[in-house]
Structure formats: C-alpha cells, structure tokens
Image (cartoon, rainbow, N blue to C red):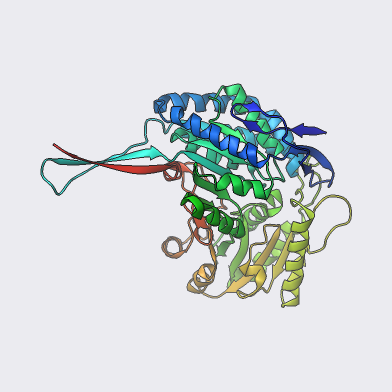
Amino acid sequence: MRIDRNFVNGRFIAPASDDRISVRNPATGAIVAEVAAASDAQAIEAVEAATIAQKAWRKLPSAERAAHLHKLAAALTDCAPAIGAALALESGKSVADATNEAVYAGQIARYHAEWARRIEGEVIPSDTPDENLVLHREPIGVVACLIPFNYPVYTLMRKVAPALIAGNTVVVRPSNNTPTSAFEIAKAVERAGLPAGVVNILAMQHATAEVLCTHPAVGMITLTGSVNAGRKVLDYCKTNIAKPSLELGGKTPAIIEPDADLEKAARELVASKTTHCGQLCTAIERVYVHDSVHDRFVALLREHMSNVKSGDRVTNPAHMGPLVNSAARASIHAMVERAVAQGATLETGGAIPAGDGFFYPATLLSNCRQDMEIVQEETFGPVLPVVRYHTLDEALAMANDHQFGLSSVLYTENYRAAMKIANGIEAGELYVNRTPADPYQGFHAGWKRSGLGGDDGKHGMLEFTQTRLVVMKY
C-alpha cells in the first residue's frame, strides 16, 4: 500500500503526526493508500513558503513564467502513466481515461503558458487635460485551490496553470477521496524544476483547511464543489476579504424539440449521464421532451440506459464505474425512491446491486414533474428524470425555474428555437445539438447558485488578477 507525504516548498515533508487519510478504491471498497494529513503548522508553513516564493515569481518576466509552465506541461505528459494509474485506483476510472486526464492537464498548462504575452492592461481617456489613466493587471498573491474528487487532475491544473501564469503562487488541497493523483502531480512539479514554494500540495482534514483558507496571506480561494462547500468558502473569505472563485452545483437541463435527431440525442444524453457514473457538474440532470416525441424519446432513453453495464473499469473499461462512496450511493437511491413515491415511473435501474464497490445502475424516471426533488436537486449520479412539455416557451420557463444555472443543452434543427433559448436560458453555457465538454479556451461560469467567477480561457485567467489604476499628470 502506498503512503504519500505532503509537498511543501519544493520537497516532500515528513508527517507531523500519525494522522492518516485512508483512500479507498470505490470499485472494490478496499483501502488502497494512506496519505499523511497535514497539521495546522504545515498548512501555515506552506502559505508562508508560497508568500516568499510569490515575491520573486511575480517579478519574473511573464515569458519566463511561461517557460516554467511549458516544462511542467512536458513533465505532466511524461508522468501521465503514473498519474493515471494513481487516479484510476482512487476514482474508479479506467486506466485509459485517467491517463488521458493527465495528458489533458498538460494541454491546459500549455494553453495558459501562451497567455504570457497577452495579459494586458488598458489606457483610458481622462477628463483632465495632460493626464493619462493606466490600468494595470497584477497578481493577487497566494491562492488556495480546493479540488474536487470527480476530475481531480484536470481541475487541479485548470486552477493552478492560470494562477501561475498571472504571477500568483498556490497552495492546493486535493479531495480526501482522490489525493494520491495530486501527489503524482507534485512529482511532476518537482521534475519540472519549478521554484520552491510556487506550488504546494497538501492533504488535510477540514479543520486544517480552515486554517489554510483563513491565513492572512491568502488573497484568493478557488473551489470546485458543492453549494454547501461554497458557503463555507465564503465564510473563510470574510476573514481576509479574500476573493472567491466558485464553481458549485449544476442541474443541466436538456430540451428536446420535435425536429431533433432523437437517436443522436438519446445516445449522447445517456453517455453524458453515465460517464464517470454521472459525477460531472455539467452532466445532463433533467430532460424536457416535447409532447409529440415524448414516448418515442423515452423508449430510446430506456433502451440505451438498459444497455449500460456497471463494473470495475480497471478490468472492464467499457463499463460504467462506481460512485465515490457508499454515502453518495445511499443518498442517490433515497432520492430515486422518493421520486417513485411522488408519482414518477421507474423505467429502468433504481436498485442497489449486490457485491463490492459503490455501484449504482443507470436509472431512468419518466412522468416527473417540475416540483419534484429529483428535478430540483442535483443527484450527481446516473439518474435521469424526464418531464413532458407542450411549447418551447414552457420548456424554457421550466429550465429556468431552478436554483442552478451552470450549463444547458438544446437539441433542435430550428435556428429560431436555438436563438430563443440562446437568448433566454439562465445559465452560463448553452450547448446546441451536443452535450457539455467545457472547452478550456471558453469560459465556464455559473449563474445563480452555480457559482461566482469562473474558469477557462481569457476570462478564467483574469480571475487570478487584480487591477491597479495609475493616474499620471504630465
């Protein structure tokens, strides 16, 4: 069994105590690794190291920071097999998918390295004669990066790469469900020769995470997680008036118009809902189907979902993998049972399988209503509720009648329908005739309770900057 140490100021440090975080393989339930839990003192040491390193890091020409990021990207690519092996074991992903996630992380690092010469300020006309207004973009300082369990390698670099190119340093707290892949990334950081203290990675308990996030030197906290986790981060931010960047819950609606390619839509919706067992913030979470094609489309969904098989993806890569833990499975199953009790029809799935691991079948519910919990609350699992609609205006109203606004989907061949939804949907993203994929040159930002700020692209990179206005009289 592997035992990992925390990475602070360019080196792996000795454990401060016997406190360990056990890591389970969700496909078997077995403990596969132990990670030393950082102490409060070690979290403070990491912030102090990042603070010292940032003073020199921010002064490097941006092209030199980019060169470091290119070296990190190369190291991530070289280390992708080791990162992927660790990720597969702790997450239930196939080795191929986990390794590809590490390769993708390297691509993200390369993409953000190319922003080096493109971080620009502004010259603004002044109302006063003989005066210039010059707006500078500057780094914030030390950024605390809180990483989720579902795509931990991709999300880690999604936050770290733009933070670094903007001139910040980082202290990363990986999920306690998936920390071992983060320490393989730390080995890539070490291999790339990044200056000590620029990237620090520590696993920790929640109390220590609070010590980290409320340290006076932390100027920004970026989180991908639940709404409740977002509220906790906002509490942390109040201590220092730190800047929050939050990607929180999602409940992606998919609207299926009568002219849609129903077979394509059904196949893609089921793939979205069953990838990583539905543990994806932008996975399809509710489906609105026009009355004229409702029965045909439900039959297609039922056929495709019934064909999804679950299993350990290390040995069966084509299968759907497990949920993260037994608590998640119990919560999702209880939601399905309540939906059926409220009048939903169970088309397929909906039963906890026997055997090891935290598996749950692809589950389809028809005859759902807008007011049901299964439509209003995020399941974060392979459960798909279907609601019938009569007009596009009704579908849009129901899609918008929600606490979340992260992503959305529309299947239609009618440009008028597409423009109506594009201009009326209350979400940060709309995908037309395809399911969400978060292109890293776009901007992934939620409305409503789905978050504050955002990730990816120019605008995601600028989240890691602050401005200084220089008023210069001459």
Tell me the quarter of the image containing the C terminus. top left
Residue at image coords 77%, 64%: 333
Which of the two residues, 302 or 262, is positioned nearer the viewer here? 302
Residue 382 at least partly seen: yes
Can you name the residue that lies furthest to the front here? 41
Q: Where is residue 230 in the image (x, y as percent from the top left)?
A: 57, 56
Q: Quadrant of residue 105?
A: top right
Q: Position of residue 412 (x, y in %)?
A: 51, 61
Q: Where is residue 204 in the image (x, y as percent from the top left)?
A: 68, 43
Residue 433 at least partly seen: no
Residue at image coords 59%, 39%: 44
Q: Quadrant of residue 135?
A: top left
Which of the two residues, 34 or 380, is positioned nearer the viewer here? 34
Residue at image coords 48%, 50%: 240
Which of the two residues, 63 or 385, is positioned nearer the viewer here? 63
Tell me the quarter of the image containing the N terminus. top right
Can you name the residue that lies furthest to the right here? 355
Q: In this view, does 414 lie to the left or right of 235?
A: left
